[in-house]
Image (cartoon, rainbow, N blue to C red):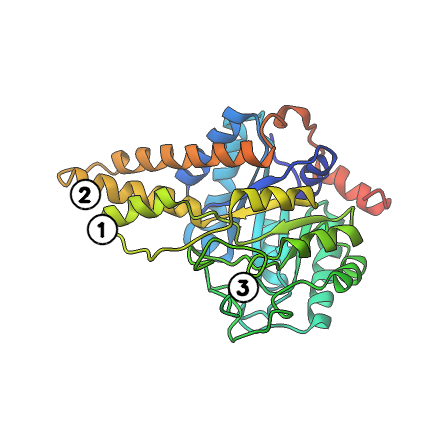
Amino acid sequence: MSLITLRQLLDHAAENNYAVPAFNISNMEQGLAIVQAAAACNSPVILQASKGARVYAGDIMLHHIVIALSEMYPKVPICLHQDHGNDTGTCYSAMNHGFTSVMMDGSLEADAKTPASYEYNVNITQNVTEVAHSIGVSVEGELGMIGSLETGTSSEEDGVGAQGVFTREELLTDPDLAVDFVQKTKVDALAIACGTSHGAHKFSRKPDGEILAIDVIEKINKKLPNTHLVMHGSSSVPQYLQDLINANGGVITQTYGVPIEEIEKGIKYGVRKVNIDTDCRMAMSGQFRYIANSCPEELDPRKFIIAAMKELTTLCKERYERFGSAGNASKISIISLDDMAQQYKNGVL
């Protein structure tokens, strides 16, 4: 079995100066394409499911998809991660269904829309961490609100997104507060806000320092050099996929994602997990549209899905290579959850 915890995976990434892509999945085809690409690149991978994905596919189905993938590709370390857990129940149920890592997003209240107080975030994240660590499961916390520095708003994806208009300061993680948060919650990884956002429409122009604050990552890293940082909303929204979709009946207004070279800067400053969802959706849906448009007589869904998986595999391979995770899968020895729990108990982690 090749299932691994987030903490162990990111510890190895930190020791070797790379980041691991975290791809959202909700079905077998996505999982196959992503892990096939990981196997081809000798890369570890994080497969994550949002609460919405868990409702769509079902916990038992998702669990068995990942178990099957781990058996099919035993040389690929796979972390199964709960993305944006909105309350303790969501996180605890994920642990009960075999997730080796959970994110407690206490930056928002349980409705995943209302900005939460700092005290609420600390308390709920601390509670989840205590339970998770007792069974060896890793925890990612979030400090700051993921949102656009251009508009002052947070786009919604899978039901998660702060409602309202916010100041620049509210949309950026405070480095000093990050130190206090990590010390109190004992999280294994910290998702920070630096101007990235969910969805395809992140920036109206190629981002610069005014709307993508990579310097915030550097400042946090200087204060927390041993903390694994996470970039959410980090799809690059490739132009070729925008063009493919629009050429085949889609309507995506010109938009810009997070340039890979900016993510690479973040990796130099301690980013060890990079969340990617929109790019994967665009890769697959672009091929669905292309096949439907070019072969209107086609009825076999496999013809659509095989092309979509091929496009997704190509995209994932590029991310493994650019983030530096390629070539590292075979270098990682997987530790059991029981051993991880003992290390947390003994204060090793």
Q: Which residue is mark 3?
A: 147
Image height of 251 relative to 70, above or below: below
Q: Secondary structure at mark 1?
A: loop
- Which residue is pictured at 36% across the width and 55% down the height? 254
| Residue 253 picture quarter | bottom left
**Between residues 132 and 122, which one lies in front from this camera angle?**
122
Image height of 116 relative to 35, above or below: below
- Which residue is pictured at 58% across the width and 37% down the height? 323
In the visual, does 29 lie left or right of 245? right
Residue type pointed to by label 1:
Gly
Residue type pointed to by label 3:
Gly
Q: Position of residue 163 (x, y in %)?
A: 51, 73
| Residue 20 picture quarter | top right
**Between residues 157 and 15, which one lies in front from this camera angle?**
15
Q: Which residue is mark 1?
A: 249
Whether residues under marks 1 and 3 lie with C-beta atoms below 8 angstroms apart, the answer is: no
